[in-house]
Amino acid sequence: MRLTTKGRFAVTAMIDLAMRQHSGPVTLAAISQRQNISLSYLEQLFGKLRRHELVDSVRGPGGGYSLARLARNVTVADIIFAVDEPLDATSCGGKHDCTSGRDGKSGKCMTHELWTTLNRKMVDYLDSVSLQDLVDQQRLRQLQEASKAAQGCSTVRMERGAGETATAVSAVAADATV
């Protein structure tokens, strides 16, 4: 059981869209470039996302895609199921006929309930994570990376000399607020 690139790319593209839609519709070409996902693949995925009413499209100049609902009202499960991503750990596809005995009778394999329970827990978890949660995590990560970069800059500047320390600290503080 694995989440394929279809589900991974759909979630990644939706995070990208949610982070940038405040300035208008987002083009698939821009998402493709930023996330290194094939444009034709994104077109297929967004067709499915649109049919499931997760995104809206705007045609023409200045067109692109925007979220059809608030990010807090879209779950990872919504996205994955919209692009037809199977999340099934059972070998029978949930059909309850995992085994076929020598007598020709079919039935459940010995681990069927284990995998069925895992399926439910996966769906419950993915349904508990909103697109907004992922956007917030990404923004926090970007802030942390910017802060580390600023700290790295201040360390380099402070090593120049004691007389330049105050200037370096001021410059880093100004960079961090921008």
Image (cartoon, grey):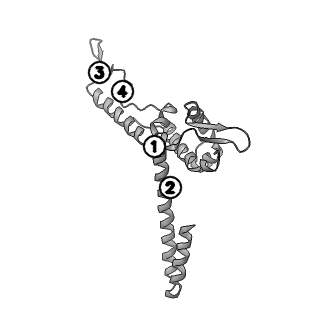
Q: CA distance from mark 3 to mark 1?
A: 34 Å
Q: Is residue 102 above or below residue 79?
A: above
Could you say which is closer to the camera, residue 99 or residue 169?
169
Label 2: which secondary element: helix
Disc 1 packing (10 Å; few <14; some 14–19; many ≥20)? many
Q: Residue 134 appears at what percent x and percent y?
A: 47, 48
C-beta proximity under 8 Å, tags 3 and 2 = no
- Residue, disc 3: 108
C-beta proximity under 8 Å, tags 2 and 1 = no
Q: CA distance from mark 4 to mark 2?
A: 38 Å
- Please report whichever mark, 4 or 1, sits nearer to the chain's N-terminal start: 4
- Residue, disc 2: 139
Q: CA distance from mark 4 to mark 1?
A: 29 Å
- Residue, disc 1: 130
Q: Amino acid at mark 3?
A: Lys
Q: Amino acid at mark 2?
A: Arg
Q: Amino acid at mark 4?
A: Ser
* Residue drawn at point x = 49 percent, y = 66 percent: 147
Label 4: which secondary element: loop
Q: CA distance from mark 3 to mark 2?
A: 45 Å
* Residue drawn at point x = 50 percent, y = 39 percent: 5
- Please report whichever mark, 4 or 2, sits nearer to the chain's N-terminal start: 4
Q: Residue 118 appears at what percent x and percent y?
A: 33, 34
Label 3: which secondary element: loop
- Please report whichever mark, 3 or 2, sits nearer to the chain's N-terminal start: 3
Q: Is residue 16 above or below residue 143?
A: above
For this view, does 125 lie left or right of residue 160? left
- Residue, disc 4: 91
Q: Amino acid at mark 1?
A: Ser
User: Marks 3 and 2: which is nearer the front?
Assistant: 2
Label 1: which secondary element: loop
